[in-house]
Image (tube, rainbow, N blue to C red):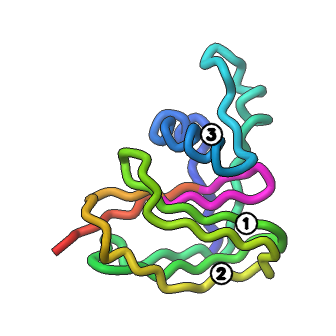
Amino acid sequence: MERSGSTINDLFNKYDYLFDILGAQSECRKPDSKDQKEEELTIAIRSLQLMKFSLFPNPAKHSITLNFESAPGKIDIYINNTMGDLIYHEHIPEFDGHFDQFIDLSHNTNRLLILSIVQNEKMFAEQIFFEPN
């Protein structure tokens, strides 16, 4: 099953604060002006296409399992809360193209988290709903 991330405009509307965070943590950059044309936005941030993406359970109670395939190379995986606080980060300098990992989120108390995967100036984003005990 192939699944892609949100459109560029959707990402700006839903996760505007994340672009500031990601801009500081990676090569992903938010355009300076909201008046720029859509063509310029597409150049600034492109959607990362993932293959065989799965994230479960969602909603999560304690942890998630994240699986996906992408091109080999450097990759960063971020999970932020809606305030922009970094909950989880993994930098993989020599990503082999396959990710399959259990991620413990038991220390989290927020109900909504944002998963962001950044590779080669492209980004994939997905919501994680969390049900803390």
Mark closest to the chain's N terminus, 1 or 3: 3
Q: Mark 3–mark 2 contact, CB under 8 Å?
A: no
Q: How many marks?
A: 3
Q: Find numbered disc 3 in the image and state the secondary structure of the residue it sits on.
A: helix
The answer to whether residue 33 is above or below residue 22 is above
Q: Position of residue 67 (x, y in %)?
A: 58, 80
Image coordinates of residue 26 in percent, x first then y, are 70, 50
Q: Is residue 10 above or below residue 93?
A: above
Neighbour tally class for label 1: few under 14, some 14-19, many 20 plus, Cα within 10 Å: many
**The C terminus - image quarter:** bottom left
Q: Amino acid at mark 2?
A: Phe
Task: Check disc 2 and report the residue beneath it.
Answer: 99
Task: Tell me the element at label 1.
Answer: strand
Which mark's residue is nearer the viewer, 3 or 2? 2
Residue that badge 1 annotates: 75
C-alpha span from label 1 to label 2: 10 Å
Q: Which mark, by number, is residue 108?
A: none
From the image, state whether disc 1 or disc 3 is nearer to you: 1
x 53%, y 76%: residue: 54
> Badge 3 local density, few (<14 within 10 Å), some, or many (20+)?
some
**Quarter occupied by residue 48:** bottom right
> Which stretch did the figure color magenta?
115-124
| Residue kind at label 1, given as amino acid type | Ile
* CB-based contact (under 8 Å), mark 1 and mark 2: yes
Image point (65%, 33%), residue name:
30
